[in-house]
Amino acid sequence: MADPSSYRPKPGQIPDSPGVYKFRDEHRRVIYVGKAKSLRQRLASYFQDLAGLHPRTRTMVTTAASVEWTVVSTEVEALQLEYSWIKEFDPRFNVKYRDDKSYPYLAVTMNEEFPRVQVMRGHKRKGVRYFGPYGHAWAIRDTVDLLLRVFPVRTCSAGVFKNAARTGRPCLLGYIGKCSAPCVGRVSDEEHRELAEEFCDFMAGRTGTYIRRLEQQMTDAAEEMEYERAARLRDDIEALKKAMEKNAVVLADATDADLMAVAEDELEAAVQIFHVRGGRVRGQRGWVTDKVEAVTTGDLVEHALQQLYGEETGDSVPKEVLVPALPDPVEPVQEWLTERRGSNVSLRIPQRGDKKALMETVQRNALQALGLHKTKRASDLTTRSRALEEIAGALDLDSAPLRIECYDISHLQGDDVVASMVVFEDGLQRKSEYRRFQIKGFEGQDDVRSMHEVITRRFRRYLAEKERTGEWTNGENASSDGASADGTSTDGAPLGNAALDGDTTGNAFAGNAFTEEDGRPKRFAYPPQLVVVDGGQPQVAAAKRALDELGIDDIAVCGLAKRLEEVWLPHEDDPVVLPRTSEGLYLLQRVRDEAHRFAITYQRTKRAKRFKASPLDEVPGLGETRKQALIKHFGSVKKLRSATIDQICEVPGIGRKTAEAVAVALAQAAPAAPAVNTATGEIMEDEEVGASGTTTGSPEEPVSAGASHERRGQET
């Protein structure tokens, strides 16, 4: 526990101007990012008597070992920089909202020649129109199924579209009238894009005008006695009205707004957002966060607005945002939202009428979400604490291991040997810090030697980071163990970019000087309190030997053997046997199983790439399209190998220089062994083997992730 007075800036050193500040711990990892209208006043509040600080703030300042800041011109710039740094450094003491699910969106790919309607999740892409988010993907599909009758926009994948264009036959939707079939030229690209624009307009809430227009067309058709056309228009109107019924009318027709409500207690907070477009609720989403710092409701709202609109621009930011409490001060946030939208945005608390009534509904959803979250996780919080305490007691550690790293080796009969490193912090997965290794020091199957290499490489980089930041006093020792002076490790793995030269603590930077490389969670500079290896005595001994060779003696090591789930310690002849009902054993098993899953996934990926390898892969500048063209023209790699350069040049898109490179690559590559169809056992002729070098049959029986070791054979 650090004393805040040890790193408190000197009087008069902190500027009295807007800015953003960072607290770092002893490992130079950023643990908190904040902004201030006056850096001097805000930072001074952290260095008062510890007894007067909020418990969470007190924990943060005693965990920190330094503070630094960046001066900016305005409070809006401070807000933007704070958001950027929180995204970059992922500080442990900042409010971080966790989506309770990955919400699906209805997306229209307007960036394609023939726009496509589909369900999308994850990060938003440029040139794609998004509607939602929705609670369930089936809700999107139901809505789209109704609207395709009126707006027959393409919904098929690129492969189906190209196949239909090649064969000249549309898919089933084209035959039943739910696709305008641009793949076979029934409509031009301009007509299809106009359909997509009308679809987007309807989803954006501009429904009344369109339905009135269809009703007028239906009336005109009936008057002209075109009854079949009138009947089709009638059915179209019914389909549109049915789709509209799925989104209840809650506000006036022209209202575009997001309503945000917060439910909180001393430890956690839940945020619910309703997206209202055209007066109808078009989407809903929710977040939950641990209150790791002393925050008000206004602060929670500000952080939620940053996460909600930090990557959005234009119409994705609504004209009106209704919140339960305003950030203090509210002007910079409102100005920031206005910049994101490109026009004025109103940020306010609803006082009366329909908007206040809808806000009460959103608030009830937030309370329900917090209650459900606590039902799921209340026991987890207690259980995780108990598990870490049990591990500390069983392994005779000084304190609970808040950061645990686990390593596993995976291979298939000695081929494609890889290793995984998974990280658990406070008993929870930290997937952003997972790492994968290729074993480089030797070939063949030797789990003990592989474990020694992986531990050495990981902690060699840790020592190199300590040496670079000045924490490692014995620089000669660090270099002798594999960290060279040029910032690379002797095994060839880059150590990352160096940070800015000079003392950064307590200084105000200008321009881009605040973009330090150190402190990011993606680095190896943050050490664990416990290293877990998948295995027994030999693997534990190898890991301990690697740490001893590097001069590291403050990191505990243990191993978890699969057979009897025994915990092995270095230099101990007998294992530690935790009770089967122990929460500590359960946590170690989860850590070990996650490392095993991550390692096997990587190993299978490498193996699949090796099976698909082809001599043509070595030809520079030869992409997949031209590879397939060569195989299609000659029929097989064998016939391509025997072709002359002039014959290869006959393939469309292949010039003489490329043809010469293909001929050289195939001449240098050894002919592949006879391929065997594993389903029948027969030897395949070369004509049946594709460009990837694999047979038409499966090279091996696929094994699910949960399959037993007996089914995997020698795969570990």
Image (tube, helix red, strand yellow):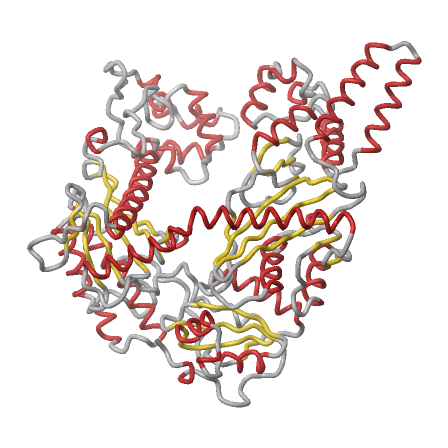
Question: Which residue is rendered at x = 75% and y = 46% of the image?
Answer: 256
Question: Which residue is rendered at x = 80% and y = 13% of the image?
Answer: 231
Tell which of 308 and 169 is nearer to you.
308
Question: Which residue is rendered at x = 19% and y = 30% of the image?
Answer: 710
Tell which of 550 and 668 is nearer to you.
550
Of the 4 image quadrants, the one containing the N terminus is bottom left
Tell which of 529 and 512 is nearer to you.
529
Residue 414 placed where, x, y %?
19, 39
Outermost right residue: 223
Left or right, 539 with reference to 471: left
- Asked if residue 528 shows in the view, the reply is yes
Left or right, 626 with reference to 443: right
Outermost left residue: 573
**Vertical placement of residue 127 versus 291, above or below:** above
- Asked if residue 130 shows in the view, the reply is no
Outermost bottom residue: 11
Left or right, 566 with reference to 201: left
Of the 4 image quadrants, the one containing the C terminus is top left
Residue 48 placed where, x, y %?
49, 83
Left or right, 212 with reference to 586: right
Locate residue 211: give its quadrant: top right
**Vertical placement of residue 147 versus 365, above or below:** above
Residue 507 placed where, x, y %?
51, 81
Residue 217 placed where, x, y %?
87, 21
Locate residue 37: give its quadrant: bottom right
